[in-house]
Image: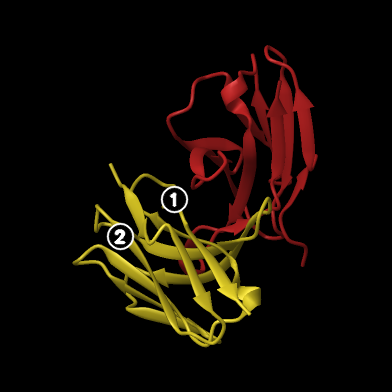
Amino acid sequence: ETGVTQSPTHLIKTRGQQVTLRCSSQSGHNTVSWYQQALGQGPQFIFQYYREEENGRGNFPPRFSGLQFPNYSSELNVNALELDDSALYLCASSFPGTEGNEQFFGPGTRLTVL
Amino acid sequence: KQEVTQIPAALSVPEGENLVLNCSFTDSAIYNLQWFRQDPGKGLTSLLLIQSSQREQTSGRLNASLDKSSGRSTLYIAASQPGDSATYLCAAWGTGQNFVFGPGTRLSVLP
């Protein structure tokens, strides 16, 4: 059984550019959630995908968008990057209804916007 | 709107001590509460999950309790070791279909 994986590990972009981050869910999990973690803070919920549909969204602008594929892997896209988008982006997978909906996190992608 | 706080923000203890980390949440209508460990610059490692119907969970030297009525959870670490040094985060899963995280407690265990 493989855990949650994310790519790339690190990324440097300039303001105004666009970025795509990728996440592969743990085997058997059909739900992926994305979080943004600024330095020294707890993760903030961006959105969740369940069976390829968005299933909840936090307080993030529309330039944060996502996709989930039939194999339950997911992408996070951020357009028009701003300096404040610099953060660690975490994805988590789960299988709702089992074991209390325990979330399993990937190692994260560190995004730096210059 | 759920808000989660953690006390203390940072803690430094000598090796071998037993310690308690505190987590408070404002909305008691939660489905579960999960504790995580995060090493610097890394992802989150799940430590314990307590479902709303449970009062506590144990794993090795870790014990987590949940009191929904008072909006509190505690993580007890027995016989702390330098390898326990990390940031500990609690997160509450409620009606919003997502986890709300606390800011974390940064733990340093000194040899």
* Image point (77%, 63%), residue name: A2
**Res B103 label:** 1
List x then y, in percent, for residue A82. 61, 18
List x then y, in percent, for residue A101. 49, 61
Under tag 2, what secondary structure? strand
User: Closer to the N terminus: mark 2 or mark 1?
Assistant: 2
Q: Colour of chain B?
A: yellow
**Residue A28 versus residue B67 in the image, above or below:** above
* Image point (79%, 43%), residue name: A9
Of the 4 image quadrants, the one containing the N terminus of chain B is: top left
**Residue A81 versus residue A56 in the image, above or below:** above
* Image point (30%, 47%), residue name: B2
**Residue A65 versus residue A96 in the image, above or below:** above
Say if residue A83 shows up in the picture.
yes
**Res B55 label:** none
In depth, the one of A33 and A78 nearer the eye is A78
Instruction: State which quadrant residue B29 falls in.
Output: bottom left
Of the 4 image quadrants, the one containing the C terminus of chain B is: bottom right
**Residue B11 placement, left or right of B5:** right
